[in-house]
Image (spheres, rainbow, N blue to C red):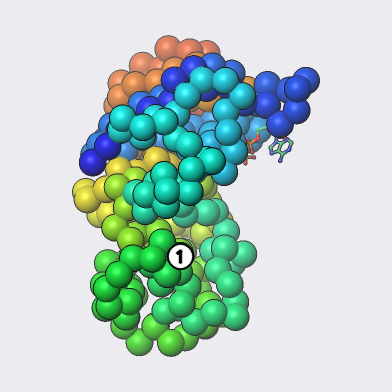
Amino acid sequence: MMMLDLQNVSFGYSRQQTTLDNVSISVRPGVSVGLVGESGSGKTTLLRLMLGLIRPTSGSIRFGEEILDTGSSAFMQRYRRAVQPVFQDPYSSLDPRQRVIDIIGEPLRSLRIPGDRTQAVTAALEAVGLPADALHRYPHEFSGGQRQRIAIARAIVARPQIVLADEAVSALDLSTRIRIVELFKTLAEKLTLVFVSHDLGVVAALCEEMVILERGKVVESGKTRDILATPKHPYTQRLLASIPRMPA
Ligand SMILES: Nc1ncnc2c1ncn2[C@@H]1O[C@H](COP(=O)(O)OP(=O)(O)OP(=O)(O)O)[C@@H](O)[C@H]1O
């Protein structure tokens, strides 16, 4: 497994704007990281940079020994196999016209991964707790929680090293959210999770380390346990006091 390392990364959607300001984050193999901050703090932008969807204005992103090079299709092919996303909304993130086997099998097809596709998709379904007969059904036949399981199966089918999840449980009702958090927890035993959330409770349940973002800047980072016990920055203290947390 390889390290994903952001060094002094800045980004703006326009010249006048600094959406991310000098952000450094190391995602080490096997150590899941939560990215926490209020709406507009730049969490999604950070994930989009990590996915190679946008490029830093300055600073660098390394994956192992290599610089994340969005211009190299050979690098991006390897990178996409290693780093997969899960998005927030399980309704809009799945193509309603495709069957589950095609949705989950999509990374295998686009990354040209050889092998038995049905077998790989069935294994991914099993890993997320869905029955094998889901294969030939359509997204509308599933609940929100089941759809998020389908999205997670798609993210893990190519056996990535890192899964980047953007508010991946926020759209779910509380009991479903708890079950999907449990699923992420099981998955995090085998891969590295980067979990964006405004919910400190969810991050506390899932991530060994966390990074607190305020208006595009890292204000605090370190072990989740330490930060929750003694938040140093006033912003973190406010977040801790104000955010409704998931019951233990
Ligand atoms: N495509 C875009 N073009 C211009 N500005 C953008 C774009 N996307 C986001 N922004 C701006 O960048 C800032 C950070 O947004 P971002 O979505 O990264 O924050 P976030 O922490 O993920 O917030 P949320 O939790 O609400 O999604 C915001 O001020 C937002 O308005």
Q: Is residue 41 visible?
A: yes
Determine whether 61 is above or below 218 in the image.
below
- The residue located at (68%, 26%) in the rendering is 12
* Image-based side of 79 in relation to 38, left or right: left
**Mark 1: which amino acid?**
Ser
What residue does disc 1 label? 110
Q: Quadrant of the C terminus?
A: top left
Residue 110: x and y, percent?
46, 65
Q: Is residue 8 above or below residue 56?
A: above
Can see residue 202? no
Q: How many marks?
A: 1
Of 76 and 10, the residue lying toward us: 76
Crowd tier of the residue under label 1, counting other residues whose Cα lies within 10 Å: few below 14, some 14–19, many 20 or above: few
Residue 111: image location, x then y, percent:
41, 61
Report which quarter residue 101 is drawn in.
bottom left
* Residue 223 in the figure: left or right of residue 221: left
Using residue 221 as the reference point, say whether residue 30 is left or right of it.
left
Q: Quadrant of residue 48?
A: top right
Q: Residue at x 31, y 38 (%)?
A: 32
Q: Nearer the viewer, residue 219 or 2?
A: 2
Q: Secondary structure at mark 1?
A: helix
